[in-house]
Image (cartoon, rainbow, N blue to C red):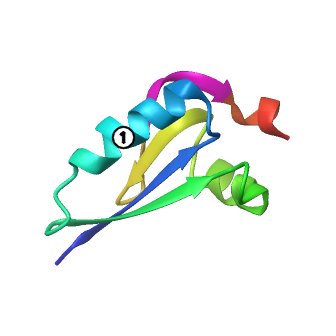
Amino acid sequence: MKSTAIFYHAGCPVCVDAEQNLAAALDPNRIDVEIVHFGEQPQRLNEAEQQGVKSVPALVLDGQVFHINFGASLSDLR
């Protein structure tokens, strides 16, 4: 059974770099990755916060949040 991951980011250089390097490195045979760019989908901020995301870039894999580096806090994106 495949795992599900959501990669949340805000489009900043730190986020884009993490997307290009980390999210793209996940094995597509094992993990379905959805990319959420808050500049394009700001309505998903509440969803990310409910999952425990505090800052972006962040990867939520099977319900567990992994904060990657630090681009911006969610409160800065509101």
Report the residue that reaches farthest toward the top.
Answer: 70
Q: Nearer the viewer, residue 1 or 39?
A: 39
Q: Is residue 72 above or below residue 64?
A: above
Q: Nearer the viewer, residue 72 or 64?
A: 72
Residue at x 62%, y 39% (from the top left corner): 11
Residue at x 57%, y 56% (from the top left corner): 36
Q: Quadrant of residue 34?
A: bottom left
Q: Work out which quarter of the rendered image holds the N terminus and state it.
A: bottom left
Q: Is residue 46 above or below residue 21?
A: below
Q: Quadrant of residue 62?
A: bottom left
Residue at x 61%, y 30% (from the top left corner): 12
The spot of residue 40 in percent (x, y) is 71, 57
Disc 1 is placed on an element classified as helix
**45 drawn magenta:** no
The spot of residue 16 in percent (x, y) is 49, 36
Q: Nearer the viewer, residue 66 or 14?
A: 14
The spot of residue 73 in percent (x, y) is 69, 28
Q: Is residue 37 visible?
A: yes
Q: Is residue 46 visible?
A: no
- Determine the main secondary structure of the stretch shown in magenta: strand
Q: Is residue 8 above or below residue 75?
A: below
Relative horizontal placement of residue 63, taking residue 71 as reference (left or right): left
Relative horizontal placement of residue 73, taking residue 17 as reference (left or right): right
The spot of residue 48 in percent (x, y) is 63, 52
Which residue is denoted by mark 1 in the rendering?
A: 20
**70 drawn magenta:** yes
Residue at x 40%, y 34% (from the top left corner): 18
Q: Residues within 10 Å of mark 1 (few under 14, many from 20)?
A: few
Name which residue type carries label 1: Gln
Q: Which residues are magenta?
A: 67-72
